[in-house]
Image (cartoon, rainbow, N blue to C red):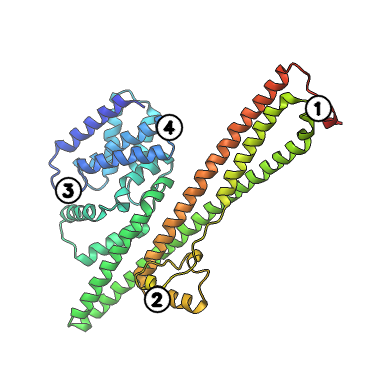
């Protein structure tokens, strides 16, 4: 990665952002650009970008919002042109310049990245949607939006725009989805709760029923539409995660089958030959140990874990019991479970909180599975290579010839 070039890009971009009076750009400012650069480096590293790809993404991050010095609409294209001009003077490869421009252009909403580097920058640009400081950042964006478009928005209008945006948004990289999606849904739920309270307040305080009826009906329909969008998102995300879990179990089962066969073959075929071939004891033991350890980690991946299976009414009233996971109710009787489900269904906030928790804990389970699955495959790959080398070394350098004749008769 060309650190010197990245530093030059930083200086150039910051000079551009400071060259015009952007005091009213309280959201798209230097601080935002620096946050995007930092997020791009973190997400890009986690996504497995090469040094060259990471360099492209970081340079693109510095230039992705410099177009605001010219105009708001189409600032991505202007930023790409600024980047092309700067990189051309630095004799940067044309192929890489094109990739930098594509990354910048991909940040245009609605985002449609076509490559992993583009996905990384898109996720970095909107990472604040899944952070705890979302409210403060969103307030700054509202202030900037109202200034640029020349009119203030009502609380309802802004909440509706923000809810629609969060509902339609998706993170593209696995890292961003894991790190930011759950908090994004929490932020979305808070906005929906605030919107419901606003509608209820307007409904109770509105004296002109004839004039307000249609407007209130439209607002309620908006709430229902947003709610359906959230539920659809949860359904799609949960289905994807369940598929990931099934893939992990399938890969673990492959390791279990392969290493069971290896251990069986070792003891059945070589076990009786070791007394005549003592030099093969260490290689055989090495391969057996590798297979056994691999087998253990594969079993850990597929090993089920459930909780007590009992919840109390107090936990339901305090909204602590998650009834969407079977491990929390498998020992309950039907009447208590039915009562708990009805309580949860009648409380939308409790229902969504349970969905978020279910999504979060499923992510933890997936992290556990894939962490041990990676260890399992790494042990198998490197252990198998070492075992083969030890076998070859033992056979070639043994003072006595290897006698496996009955094995091949």
Asked whether disc 1 touches disc 2, contact meaning CB atoms under 8 Å apart, the reply is no
Q: Farthest residue to the front: give it.
A: 275
Q: Position of residue 121 (x, y in %)?
A: 35, 42
Question: What is the crowding at mark 4: few (fewer than 14 residues within 10 Å), some, or many (at least 20)?
Answer: few
Question: What is the crowding at mark 3: few (fewer than 14 residues within 10 Å), some, or many (at least 20)?
Answer: some
Residue bearing mark 1: 404
Asked whether disc 3 touches disc 1, contact meaning CB atoms under 8 Å apart, the reply is no
Q: Position of residue 50 (x, y in %)?
A: 43, 32
The secondary element bearing badge 1 is classed as loop
Q: Nearer the viewer, residue 188 or 261?
A: 261
In the image, residue 157 sits, relative to residue 69, either above or below, namely below
Q: Is residue 96 left or right of residue 64?
A: right
Q: CA distance from mark 3 to mark 4?
A: 34 Å
At a point 34% along the width and 37% down the height, the residue shown is 41
Q: CA distance from mark 3 to mark 1?
A: 79 Å
Residue bearing mark 2: 343
Q: CA distance from mark 4 to mark 1?
A: 48 Å
Mark closer to the chain start, 3 or 1: 3
Residue bearing mark 3: 26
Q: Position of residue 130 (x, y in %)?
A: 32, 52
Closer to viewer: mark 3 or mark 1: 1
């Amino acid at each position: 990665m060309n650190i010197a070039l990245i530093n030059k890009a930083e200086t150039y971009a910051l000079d551009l952002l400071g060259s015009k009076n952007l005091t009213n750009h309280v959201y798209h400012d230097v601080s935002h650009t620096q946050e995007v650069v930092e997020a791009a480096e973190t997400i890009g590293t986690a996504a497995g970008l090469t040094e060259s790809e990471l360099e492209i993404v970081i340079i693109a991050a510095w230039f992705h919002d410099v177009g605001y010095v010219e105009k708001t609409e189409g600032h991505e294209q202007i930023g790409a042109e600024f980047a092309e001009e700067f990189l051309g003077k630095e004799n940067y490869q044309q192929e890489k310049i094109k990739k930098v421009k594509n990354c910048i252009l991909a940040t245009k909403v609605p985002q449609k990245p076509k490559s992993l580097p583009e996905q990384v920058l898109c996720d970095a640009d909107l990472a604040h949607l899944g952070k705890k400081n979302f409210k403060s950042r969103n307030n700054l964006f509202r202030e900037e939006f109202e200034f640029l478009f020349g009119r203030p928005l009502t609380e309802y209008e802004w909440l509706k725009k923000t809810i629609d945006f969060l509902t339609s948004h998706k993170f593209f990289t696995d890292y961003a989805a894991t790190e930011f999606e759950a908090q994004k849904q929490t932020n979305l739920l808070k906005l929906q709760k605030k919107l419901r309270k606003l509608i209820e307040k307007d409904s109770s305080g509105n004296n002109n029923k004839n004039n307000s009826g249609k407007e209130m009906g439209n607002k309620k329909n908006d709430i229902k539409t947003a709610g359906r969008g959230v539920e659809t998102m949860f359904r799609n995300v949960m289905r994807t995660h369940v598929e990931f879990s099934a893939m992990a179990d399938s890969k673990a089962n492959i390791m279990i089958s392969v290493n069971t066969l290896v251990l069986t073959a070792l003891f059945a075929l070589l076990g009786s030959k070791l007394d005549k071939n003592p030099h093969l004891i260490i290689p055989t033991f090495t391969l057996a140990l590798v297979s056994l350890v691999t087998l253990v980690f594969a079993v850990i991946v597929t090993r089920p874990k459930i909780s007590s299976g009992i919840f109390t009414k107090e936990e339901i009233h305090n909204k602590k019991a998650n009834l969407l996971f079977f491990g929390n109710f498998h020992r309950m009787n039907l009447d208590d479970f039915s009562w708990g489900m009805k309580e949860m269904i009648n409380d939308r906030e409790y229902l969504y909180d349970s969905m978020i928790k279910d999504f979060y804990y499923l992510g933890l389970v997936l992290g556990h599975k894939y962490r041990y699955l990676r260890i399992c495959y790494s042990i198998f790959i490197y252990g198998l290579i070492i075992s083969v080398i030890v076998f070859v070394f033992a056979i070639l350098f043994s003072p006595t010839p290897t006698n496996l004749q009955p094995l091949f008769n």
